[in-house]
Image (tube, rainbow, N blue to C red):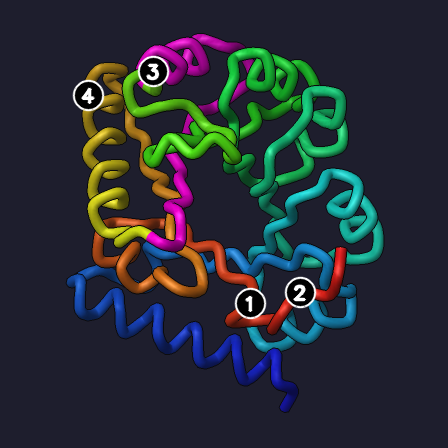
C-alpha cells in the first residue's frame, strides 16, 4: 500500500464521517483529487486506491495527462482559464469550476462540441484582489447571462475563502447565494464546489457537493 493510497482512504473516511454528521449521503459529495504538478504515477496510485475525479489548474498540463491516462477517470478544470486555452478544456472535462466572465463561457460553449460544457460560476466572496471570480453583488447578473448561452450548462457556484478567515460564513453565503440565483433562474443549480484540504469538513457541513483536495491526498506539490 502506498502513501497516496493511505491518504486517499483516510480522506474518504473523513468525508464519509462529515457527511454522516451533516445528515447527508456520502454519494452526494465528490472528492476532486487535485493533481496539479503531480506526476502520472501519483495519479495512477490514487486511481488504484479508488479515486475517480481529478482536478487540474493548467490547460496544457491537463491535456498532457489526459493523453497518458484513459479509463474511468473524470477530469475537472479548477484553475483560472484563459479564453485562448478554452479549446484544450471544453468538451474534455466533466466540469469547469471557475468561470467568471461571459466571454469565457461563450468560448467554452463554442468549443464544447456535441454536448454542453458544464460550468460553475466562480464567486470571490472575500473580494481578494489576487483572485478571479465575480463579487456576490454581480453574481446573479452573470449567472443569468451564462444560463442564456448556447452549449453551456450552468451547474452551480464555487468559491475559495482566504486561509486566514473562518470559512464557514463564506460557505454559508455561497449556499444562500446559489439558492437565490437558482430561484431567480427557475433552474436547479445542484453543485457547490467549496472546501479544500484544510476546511473540507466544514464545507460539507455547509452543503458542498464537490471538495477539492490536493495536499491531503498527494502530499506537498513538487515545484511548478
Disc 3 designates what residue?
138
Residue at the spot of label 2: 221
Of 2 and 130, nearer the camera is: 130
- In the rendered image, residue 196 lying in the magenta stretch gets the answer no
**Label 2: element kind:** loop
Disc 4: CA contacts within 10 A as few (<14), some (14-19) or many (>=20) = few
Query: Which mark sits nearer the N-terminus, 1 or 4?
Result: 4
User: On screen, 47 above or below 58?
Assistant: below
Q: Residue at x 20, y 43 (%)?
A: 172
- How packed mark 2 is, by other alpha carbons closer than 10 Å (few <14, some 14-19, many 20 or more), is some
First in sequence, mark 1 or 2: give its number. Answer: 1
Tell me which numbered mark, 3 or 2, is placed earlier along the sequence.
Answer: 3
Give the distance between the C-alpha atoms of the residues marked 4 and 2, in whole angstroms.
Answer: 40 Å
Real-space CA distance between mark 1 and mark 4, rounded to the nearest whole angstrom: 36 Å
Q: Which residue is mark 1?
A: 215
Q: Start and end of the magenta stretch?
A: 140-164
Amino acid at each position: 500500500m502506498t502513501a497516496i493510497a493511505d491518504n486517499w482512504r483516510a480522506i474518504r473516511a473523513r468525508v464519509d464521517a462529515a457527511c454522516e454528521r451533516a445528515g447527508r449521503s456520502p454519494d452526494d459529495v465528490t472528492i476532486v483529487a487535485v493533481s496539479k504538478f503531480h506526476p502520472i504515477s501519483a495519479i495512477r496510485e490514487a486511481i488504484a486506491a479508488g479515486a475517480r475525479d481529478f482536478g487540474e489548474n493548467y490547460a496544457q498540463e491537463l491535456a498532457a495527462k489526459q493523453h497518458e491516462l484513459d479509463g474511468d477517470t473524470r477530469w475537472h478544470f479548477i484553475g483560472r482559464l484563459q479564453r485562448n486555452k478554452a479549446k484544450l478544456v471544453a468538451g474534455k472535462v466533466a466540469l469547469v469550476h471557475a468561470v467568471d466572465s461571459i466571454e469565457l463561457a461563450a468560448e467554452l460553449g463554442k468549443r464544447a462540441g456535441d454536448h454542453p460544457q458544464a460550468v460553475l460560476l466562480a464567486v470571490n466572496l472575500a473580494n481578494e484582489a489576487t483572485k478571479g471570480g465575480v463579487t456576490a453583488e454581480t453574481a446573479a447578473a452573470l449567472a443569468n447571462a451564462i444560463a442564456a448561452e448556447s452549449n453551456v450548462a450552468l451547474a452551480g457556484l464555487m468559491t475559495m475563502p482566504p486561509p486566514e478567515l473562518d470559512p464557514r460564513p463564506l460557505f454559508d453565503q455561497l449556499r444562500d447565494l446559489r439558492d437565490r440565483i437558482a430561484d431567480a433562474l427557475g433552474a436547479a443549480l445542484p453543485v457547490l464546489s467549496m472546501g479544500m484540504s484544510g476546511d473540507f469538513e466544514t464545507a460539507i457541513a455547509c452543503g458542498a457537493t464537490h471538495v477539492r483536495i490536493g495536499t491531503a491526498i498527494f502530499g506537498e506539490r513538487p515545484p511548478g
